Image (tube, rainbow, N blue to C red):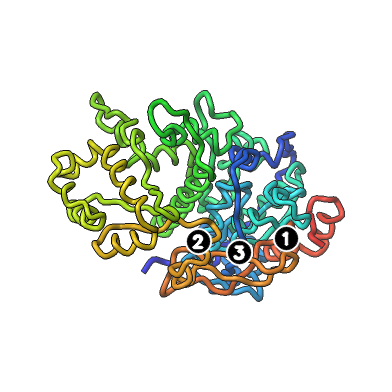
Amino acid sequence: MLPRRTDYVGARAGMASGDTLPDTPTGTGNHCDFAFESEQPFEHADSTFAVTHTLARPSTNHSRDGYRPAGFVPWEGKTMSGPLSGFRILDLSRVLSGPVATVLLADQGADVIKVEPLAGDIVRHMGGNPGGLTPGFLSANRGKRSIALDLKSAAGIGVVKRLATSADVFVQNFRPGAIEGMGLGADVIRDINPRIIFVSISGFGEKGPYAHKRVYDPVIQALSGLADIQAENEHDRPRMMRTVIPDKTTGLTAAQAITAALLARERNGAGQHVKIAMLDAVIAWLWPEGLGGLTIVGNEADVHRGQRTKDLIYETSDGYITAGAVSDAEWQGMCTALDRPQWLQDERFKTTRDRMRNAGLRLEMTARVLKEKTSAQWLARLDEFGVPCAPVLTRPEVVEQEQVKINELLFEYDHPGLGRVRQPRPAALFDVTPPGTRRIAPKLGEHGTEILREHGFTEAEIEELVDSGVLGSHE
């Protein structure tokens, strides 16, 4: 069994004498906002999972083995469970790619401290709710704690440095160079806490012609080939996906990388700097299928071949279904279900390769037949003969389908200020270390004083931060 993270201790790390803070704009995460400026829908709900293992009390051992600040107080009264119980994430990221990564860690038991500017993460204001708890914000920030700080002030930066002494992971998604300009670059934070995993999410990486440009989800769709893939054929215009795929793909990539880095640290004791570029994440994600035709150097396939055919949405006499036959057995089932046994003898469809080569004709022939009966009739026939198939549901129908209910994926609860809300549980189920009690997404600055007390701030220090406008309060 791997050793468990225990109570790391270290000296407090404030702003050193003479440190200055450049006039670095905050609130401009390096890549995410554009998705919300487009006409694409952004529909989310709030999920609320708290975290069961009570954080250990601070040790008096001040060795360099770990870095909890002297006077550290555990998260009293809050228990944490899940596979990441006992790990603390200091999350300065905003909008979507970073918050999607850290909400997965919170779902799995990590204590995620969301550090926000005094005005809050911009997503709080994208939904018309004056309380700053919009559906988009709730779904990407459930289970986190919020502290609001003036990050343009030396005192605010000093607070972040002190919080970093007890963190296992530091996440930021500012444009390259911005976090260094704030005085919170990887070298600074890792000097404070050598065991920390410092995570930088950017649009394009740190070098190159795009590195310092503002970037949003559709920009990555355009540059990664994702928009080109959506064209119906080689003559059609590129099209955007109607959801923010690059942001969320980057979030998933970052969450996996963070847990891998934590596992490596449990083995070798060393922290490290993890860098994820949105462009890299999406191209790598597309490669096994969408960009697979570019694999063989010098023998690149016609990458538009698959786009010359229809998609797998078929119209029936009363709606739409999807059905697909890849293997020989599935093709035989398809022909039998559609009462077209002659297709089995057609040389154009004899093998999987033949069927792929003649996909356009095959799909057109299938589509003509499927218009003859209702969706329910065809689905029953296709199921009978082992052909993968399903009805095409509207979004409201998704939440009412029987499989979702059996999986107990969705739950409802009364949210203070929002009324009755619906949320999905975390997708991954753990039989030994399931997440514990549920907790809703935080109000802006809701846990500020609580977090500071845990990190050894005196009541006088906290009062001074409030009075000087450095620490925001939700009250």
Looking at the picture, tell me which residue is in the foreground, 194 or 55.
55
Q: Is residue 161 left or right of residue 405?
A: right
Q: Amino acid at mark 2?
A: Val
Tag 2 residue: 398
Q: CA distance from mark 1 to mark 2?
A: 29 Å
User: In terms of image quadrants, where is residue 215?
Assistant: top right
Q: Residue furthest right?
A: 467
Q: Residue at x 41, y 25 (%)?
A: 235
Instruction: Say whether residue 420 is visible.
Output: yes
The N terminus: image quadrant: bottom left
Label 1 secondary element: loop
Looking at the picture, tell me which residue is in the foreground, 52 or 229.
229
Marks 1 and 3 close (CB-CB < 8 Å): no
Q: Amino acid at mark 1?
A: Lys
Tag 1 residue: 443
Q: Is residue 191 left or right of residue 159?
A: left
The dot on residue 143 is: 3
Q: Amino acid at mark 3?
A: Gly
**Residue 117 at x, y percent in the picture:** 73, 48
Mark positioned earlier in the residue sequence (2 or 3):
3
Mark positioned earlier in the residue sequence (1 or 2):
2
Q: Is residue 451 left or right of residue 4?
A: right
Mark positioned earlier in the residue sequence (1 or 3):
3
Task: Count neighbours of disc 2 (C-alpha within 10 A) and say few if under 14, some if 14 to 19, many if 20 or more.
Answer: few
Q: CA distance from mark 2 to mark 3?
A: 25 Å
